[in-house]
Image (spheres, coloured by chain):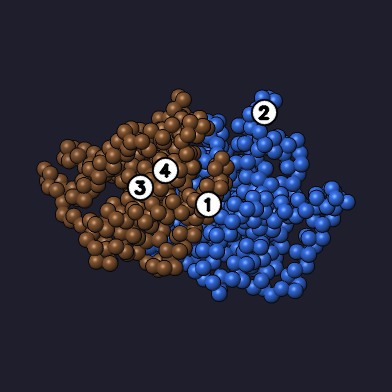
Chain colours: A blue, B brown
Amino acid sequence: MRKIFKNKFLILSLGFIALPLILSTYYVNILSLFLIMGILALSLDLIWGYTGILSFGQGAFFGLGGYTYAITAMNLMCNVEIRYLSHYTVINQGGTTYIPILLGILLPVILATVLGYFLFYARVSGVYFCIITLSLTLILQQITMQLVEHQIGNIPLGGFNGITYVPRISIGIPLLFYYSLDGPNHFYYFVLFCSVLSLIICKKICNSPFGSILTAIRDNEIRTESFGYDIRKYKMIVFAISGALAGLSGLLYCSWGSFISPWAFDFFLSAETIIWVLIGGKGTLIGAFVGAFLTQFLENLLSDILIYYWLLIMGVVFIVIVLLFPKGIMGIIYGLKRSNLKSS
Amino acid sequence: MGLEIITTAIFNALSASSILIVSALGLSIIFGMMGIINLAHGELIMLGAYFTYIFKSLGLNIWVSMAVAPIPVALIGVIIERGIIRFLYGRQMDTLLATWGISIFIVQGIRVIFGPAGKSITPPFPGTFEFYGLSFPKYRCLLILFTLAILLSMYLIFKFTKFGLKARAVIQNADMASSLGIKTPNVYMMTFCIGAGLAGLAGSLLTPIINVEPALGLKIVIRTFLVVVTGGTEILAGTIAGGTILGSTESIVALFTSTYFGNVILLLLAILIIRFKPKGLISKGY
């Protein structure tokens, strides 16, 4: 079974590597976005599908990662000249972006750890956890919207408009040479690398003893605890990992569009992430990517025709899936495979 | 000088608390009775505001339209309960997700019908009270009284009516209540109807002081969730405690510093309360 998974995984990855050869630049760009959102969905699936904690706060880590990347990258690499209020011109001086990437992952991890410490050690769970994480996201959005002329370093936060002209991710050896991933294909490969890496890491985590404990927590918290596992610690750790993934996704998104705005903390982004995971099938990891791809593909296809009605349809789909197909697409596929095995 | 600031702070705290309590009450009743967090609560508030606007533009008196607006919202609540939530009892997280789907649907539906722009209604009770050189908006004073009246009537309903008796029985032990002949599904339906109606009432009462727009629900609803979660499952006492503490703290901090700092303090306070009282400030069994 594992061998099959690996082979399929390899074929799929090769397919994704080959895609830019056929697709136009526009679609390569869109594909990068899909992958970035797939990482966000993956971060939710790790904590929701595997550990059974529904977090509405992935948007908070996503946005925090993006903002951190934007602010540090611009402070380190750019000459910013403020014209008036929050309008400015930027001269990119170049350099590698290892520090912004690192901080963009580290800060969400710290936030997740602190939040996890406060919530899990108080045995907050279920709907209470949802509400707290949801309010965290929404309050971060309100705060970022109100911070218009406030500066961090010499970057104005821009309020509703957010931060623009954020430099792309660039790699290389610090102080010697750097290479900015400006071309859509280069950036796409970087994103692909990140998503494959995070998928493999998640798979490894879930297949390890640590992962079994997470599944045990999901299935029966009290029993796991009476076996002597400190579930609070495990929950905190997995929440931190999930925060890191969401932060990574956020900073990639920020680099992709070279801007970040309070939209990152939006209620609807969190809702969509949950829809992706639900549609793909929670607790399957790859399902997160499937859900994110399918939904966004349809959204791209249909939202031109349907404009306003797209969200209406999403609302209905959401309700129908919760009511009738709680296992999602991958859950149904795995279920079919299992029943085939049994009958043959 | 000192006295003026103190009076303003007290008035702001009272006003903010009453707004919070009024908008959280419906959510709290549904949560306390059925254990369901209704994420569509904000949208029900928004519907209440929109129905007030509709009745007003149909030519009704503003007071009449504010009084009538909760009725259609309560009916919508019944439809939601019968159509969707009924199938999800006992699956707390799924209910949460389903009500979220409903909320997305309602917001977008309203946006399609009325457009994204806000509508505003002229306050029915303009002007201010003058008090030692300080001025307080009359409508906000009235709102504090309305809140007290609503709380009192809810107390009377739960304490002295037949429905209240059944409802309290269901809260204590749903299985036992149903085996004693109480139709629990009916009680649940009634509860959801009242909860939705109260949300509608909150919407209609807040219409004069807010901008009626599709995103209205979201703006109000964060605080109400925090109120209910920090308040606990004891419906009235919990809501009053949570609403007063969070509302006064936020408004006083906001008065002395700035709005967004008030937001931060509100969230931190809620997290702290939940850290030390995970079941909420006032709840049974503690």
Can you tell which quarter of the image residue A21 is in? bottom right
Quick check: do tags 3 and 2 share a chain? no
Q: Chain of mark 3?
A: B
- Tell me how far mark 2 sits from mark 4, CA to CA: 35 Å
Q: Position of residue A322 (x, y in %)?
A: 59, 52
Q: SS at mark 2?
A: helix
Mark 2 neighbour class, 10 Å CA radius: few under 14, some 14 to 19, many 20 or more: few
Q: Label 4, on which residue?
A: B191
For the residues marked 2 and 1, what is the alpha-carbon distance in whole angstroms?
32 Å
Residue occupied by mark 3:
B198
Type of amino acid at the residue the image marks with label 2: Arg
Whole-number angstrom distance, CA of label 3 to CA of label 4 = 10 Å
Frontmost of labels 2 and 4 is 4
Question: According to the image, label 1 marks what residue?
Answer: B84
Question: In which quadrant of the rendered image does the N terminus of chain B lie?
Answer: top left
Which residue occupies the foreground of this view, B188 or B212?
Answer: B188
Could you give the CA–CA distance between mark 1 and mark 3, rounded to whole angstroms? Answer: 20 Å
Mark 4 element type: helix
CB contact under 8 Å: marks 1 and 4: no
Q: Which mark is residue A223?
A: 2
| Amino acid type at mark 4 | Thr
Q: Are marks 2 and 4 on the same chain?
A: no
Give the mark, 3 or 4, whose residue is nearer the N terminus: 4
Q: Earlier in the sequence, mark 1 or mark 4?
A: 1
